[in-house]
Image (tube, rainbow, N blue to C red):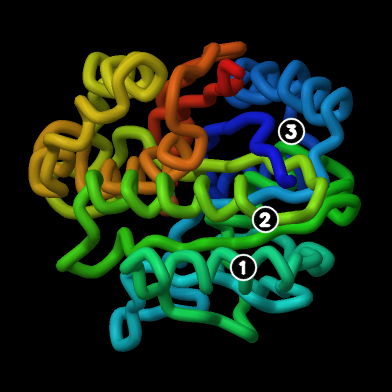
Amino acid sequence: MAKIIGGITTSHIPAIGVAMDKGLENDPYYRDLFAIYPPIRQWLNDEKPDIAVLFYNDHGLEMFLDKKPTFAIGCAPEYQNADEGWGIKPIPPVTGETELSWHIVNHLIEHDFDPTVCQEIKVDHGATVPLTLLWPNFAYQGIKVIPISINCERHPMPKPSRSYALGLAIGDAIRCWERDAKVVVLGTGGLSHQLDGQRAGILNAEFDNYCMDKLVSDPEALCVYSNLDLIEKGGAQMVELAMWMAMRGCIKGEVEERLRNYVSPISNTAVGVQLLIPKA
Ligand code: DHB
Ligand code: FE
């Protein structure tokens, strides 16, 4: 049977991808940020997951405001990306895992979630930056990836509690897949940030740390928030917490927090990183 071996949260700020392209990992501005990742890469290298289920949000590369699925699952054998205008170089394609994708889709629909099924889809920085951060030098090509997008761009967006429930259902689906596979779940995006408007640049370290605490000890405590609450507390893009909620739902039950880091700001965003291991 498939097994979820851990969950990782990380930001997807496009500037991080540009910094990697330019070899700026030791630049004073980026040094503390890039220092976070070697222990996580080591954990991935030791554990060798076969599959990464990656929760991300499509910022407009593939799903613009005119067509915005609330939840969408990649069921493709391969995922390309493309220039989005942020200056990040396109990366080689990501390999899919169609059998598990379809198993998740079937399980979800049987359990009253109705995602959009994407048999051909490009992935944006929400997916490519975390993949290149966690598996640099295109080493993500050694694993299979299932990208699952959550609408964080156009209202109405799914409630945090609904993204958590999606994660619970996907976690159950993974655990009942009759293949011996090790699965790591990635919750990308966040934490507090707002990219435009009067409150552009808002950060809220206290609330970010509260979210990271509760993600470990009591994720249901975060289910009380509406998206408007999140926006008030941490800016318009704080709603990207949705992907963290879905990741935590997949793991469910008690977790060990193997690693936590917080660097703020990078570009306009507070970067939170956690590695959570399910307690047997
Ligand atoms: C930034 C953060 C994001 O989450 C994003 O999608 C784009 C840009 C930033 O801080 O620059
Ligand atoms: Fe984003």
Residue at image position (78%, 22%) is 43
* Local SS, label 1: helix
Q: Which residue is mark 3?
A: 24
Q: Which residue is mark 2?
A: 177
* Local SS, label 2: loop
Report how far apart the C-alphas of labels 3 and 1 lie in the structure: 41 Å
Q: Which residue is mark 1?
A: 103
Residue at image position (65%, 19%) is 36
Amino acid type indicated by mark 2: Trp
User: Mark 1 vs mark 2: which is more N-terminal?
Assistant: 1
Residue 75 point in image, percent of width and height:
64, 76
Mark 1 vs 2: CB contact within 8 A: yes
Mark 3, Cα crowd under 10 Å, few <14 / some 14-19 / many 20+, is: some
User: Mark 3 vs mark 1: which is more N-terminal?
Assistant: 3
Mark 2, Cα crowd under 10 Å, few <14 / some 14-19 / many 20+, is: some
Viewer-side residue, 20 vs 258: 258
Quick check: 193 left or right of 76? left
The C terminus is located in which quarter? Answer: top right
Residue at image position (39%, 29%) is 270
Residue 136 point in image, percent of width and height:
82, 41
Compared with residue 28, is residue 7 higher up or lower down, i.e. above or below?
below
Report how far apart the C-alphas of labels 3 and 2 lie in the structure: 41 Å
